[in-house]
Image (cartoon, rainbow, N blue to C red):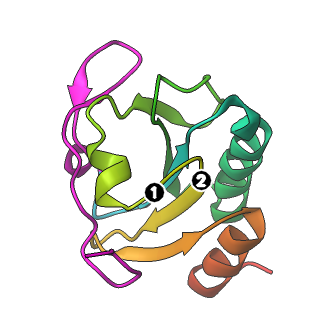
Amino acid sequence: EEVRAGDRAPNAPGLVNTAQQEIALFDIFKPYRHTVLVFTCISEDEAAVKDVVSAAGTLTGGLVKTIVIGRDALPHEVAGADNLHDKQGYAFGGYHVEGEKFRIVVVRPDGYIGAFVHDVDGLKEYFSRVFCIS
């Protein structure tokens, strides 16, 4: 069944970080911050990923943790984000990111999904309702 905003955010074990250590999403989510998950599949997404990471930090004054998750490999490093490789496919499967889609998922501090968005404008719209930003 597809997950939607308001659902409990699924865990995804077996994610590999830049140090080649395995980590799970539940180890990353914290009750004091939002987590922005950026799912990317192809190198053409690189500019969009940089825009999203920059916007997430700027819009919230650094009150979010941004994670870039690559399907086929560890994504290119982007300042302001942690990079993970979804080596076993649990994250892409759990969040139903299919094909070559670029997808952004905002996980609230309480561990529930706040939003699924497709670009910086969607991220701005979501955070404008959570933080005092215009």
Q: Quadrant of residue 3?
A: bottom left
Q: 10 Å neighbourhood of mark 2: few (<14), some, or many (≥20)?
A: few
Picture quarter containing residue 118?
bottom right
Q: Which residue is nearer to you in this view: 112 or 74? A: 74
Residue 124, given in percent of the width and then of the height, sits at 72, 72
Give the answer, above or below, for where 76 lies relative to 53. Answer: above
Instruction: Give the CA distance from mark 1 to mark 2.
Output: 7 Å
Kindly identify which numbered label has been placed on residue 97. 1
- Position of residue 73 relative to residue 28, above or below, is above
| SS assignment at label 2 | loop
Q: Are marks 1 and 2 in contact (CB under 8 Å)?
A: yes
Q: Nearer the viewer, residue 46 or 52?
A: 46
- Residue 7 position, x and y percent, is 29, 80
Instruction: Please give the label number shown on residue 101.
Output: 2
In the foreground, 114 or 134 = 114
Residues shaded magenta = 1-28
Q: Residue at x 28, y 58 (%)?
A: 94
Residue 48, given in percent of the width and then of the height, sits at 75, 46
The amino acid type found where label 1 is placed reads Val
Which percent across, then down, holds residue 12?
A: 23, 47
Q: The C terminus is located in which quarter?
A: bottom right
Q: Amino acid at mark 2?
A: Lys
Q: Main secondary structure of the magenta part?
A: loop
